[in-house]
Image (spheres, helix red, strand yellow):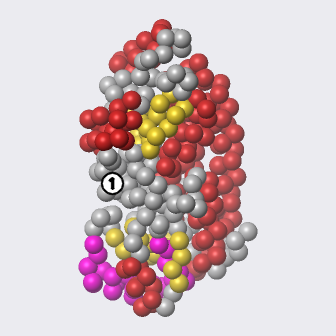
Amino acid sequence: MLAILASVLAVAALGAACGGDNVSDTSGQVKVTATLGLFRDLVQQVGGDRVQVSTLVPDGTDVHTYEPPPSQIVKLSQAKLVVMNGLNLEAALEGTIRENASSSATVLELAAGLPTLEDNPHLWLDVNNGMTYVERIRDALVSIDPAAADIYHANSEGYLAQLRTLDQEVTAAVESIPSENRKLVTFHDAYPYLAQGYGLQIVGFVVQSAGSEPSAQEVADLTNAIRDQHVPAVFKEPQFSARILELAADDAGVQVCFLYSDAFSDEVKSYVDLMRFNARELARCLGGSSG
Ligand SMILES: [Zn+2]
């Protein structure tokens, strides 16, 4: 804490004209490294032109198992702010972050101290938690770069208003689904906050933790649960091979749809797009109206 304060004071004393320190480049931007594209988007929404954000995990890649190449580690070491989720989401990255982040950098764990469901890290899939992430990013940027505090406050206010509307959209989409159809079968265990926040029931998932393989018995049990509980559709995620889920869906005679969780794709490149896609896909595949 003292080190962070000291570095903030030192930066303030140096002033913008000196440049050359590791806080900002010649354009005056604050260098930020985010673990996921999702958090890069949130930082850019709050920081706008004041920040330059790199990402450790490429879009479309599984965060739970990814280890970054040296080129990404150089950017990490230059960052003044490192934004991660915590709660073991970045289990494969955490050592790299601790070893390579600058000693003067702030490491912001977005989920730290928030109420969790069985220590599951995917809090942002409830938009209310996404809003808390945005507030934490705003506060971190304000303390690192107080000269631009007004910009960070104005940007985050506008973005939080968008997220309140987004939250209402997701709520309305789920409410349009017949209550007996509000059931989730997914590839990995990413959706307890979506389920709790918007009133869906988790019937099951293929793998307990990413990187692990389900047994034949577990796949058979999931197939039976899909059939017995009359689940209308199952949901694959773009960053995972869906073969097992597709086989289970085929056996149970239900369709396979898409839900996003940790990773972006070529079509979905922002948090708002991700949640909006999920809301529409839930309504479309579980028998609601897609608004
Ligand atoms: Zn995940």
- Residue found at x 34% / y 70%: 207
Residue 54: within the magenta?
A: no
- Residue found at x 69% / y 44%: 161
Q: Which quadrant of the figure has residue 29?
A: top right
- Residue found at x 51% / y 44%: 40
Residue 155 shown left or right of residue 140 in the figure: right
Q: Residues within 10 Å of mark 1 (few under 14, many from 20)?
A: some
Q: Residue 181, position in %: x, y?
A: 58, 79
- For label 1, the SS is loop
Quadrant containing the N terminus in the rendered view = top left
* Residue 116 at least partly seen: no
In depth, the one of 175 and 269 nearer the eye is 269
Residue 289 shown left or right of residue 136 in the figure: right
Q: Amino acid at mark 1?
A: Tyr
Range of residues picked out in magenta: 213-236
Q: Residue 238, position in %: x, y?
A: 47, 66
Q: Residue 262, position in %: x, y?
A: 46, 57
Residue 216 shown left or right of residue 238 in the figure: left
